[in-house]
Image (cartoon, rainbow, N blue to C red):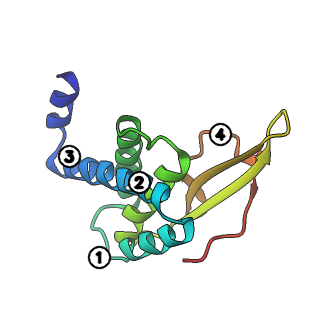
Amino acid sequence: MRRIRKFLSLPAADQWLLLKSAVLLGSIRLGLWLLPFQTMRRVLARMGKARACSKETDEALVERVVRAVSLAGRHVPGTRSCLVQSLGAQVLLARRGWPVRLRIGVARGEKGQFQAHAWLESRGKVIIGGTEDLSRYTPLSPLET
């Protein structure tokens, strides 16, 4: 009940963005499970085509989208992964004409196991997925869409 009250206390624009984020993250998770990654990237590239430039200030737009994606990722089952959240934020920001770049890095764990991590960069700054020590990951070449 507390979560519902908190959601309803948000401005309508934030409620709408949070709902869009939740649906998008769930769809991305399902798509990654059902489709090859390259096919999913093409679908997301079409979804992320810029519709119009936002009237919000730059930082305000990025903060709102990242907050909505992070919050949705905590509450939608299966969407906590860095890849799902990075892809979701990429689509939402690209649709608003904001320049973003998906990065995927690989590393070896302490026991030699393969590890991967995804994050989103914009204008040289990590905007989502930067909670880990990114310096230990070797970034792969940027993916073409």
Q: Would you place residue 89 above or below residue 110 in this image?
A: below
Residue farthest to the top?
2
Q: What distance separates the C-alpha of mark 3 from that of mark 1?
A: 20 Å
- Specify the label residue 52 is tagged with: 1
Discs 4/2, front: 2
Which of 36/26 is in front?
A: 36
Residue, x 43% and y 52% (percent of image)?
A: 29
Camera-near label (4 vs 1) is 4
User: Looking at the picture, which amino acid does disc 4 mark?
Assistant: Glu
> In the image, what residue occupies the spot 66% across and 70% down?
142
Distance CA(mark 4)–CA(mark 1): 33 Å
**Residue type of the residue flagged with mark 2:** Leu
Of callouts 1 and 2, which one flags the residue occurring earlier in the amino acid sequence?
A: 2
Residue for badge 3: 15
Task: Give me the C-alpha separation between circle 2 and circle 3.
Answer: 23 Å
Give the residue type that dot 3 points to.
Answer: Gln
Residue annotated with mark 4: 132
Q: Residues within 10 Å of mark 3 (few under 14, many from 20)?
A: some
Query: On the image, numbered disc 2 is attached to which residue?
Result: 30
Q: What percent of the width, then of the height, locates residue 141?
A: 71, 69
The amino acid type of the residue labelled 1 equals: Ala
- Is residue 40 depicted above or below 138 in this figure? below
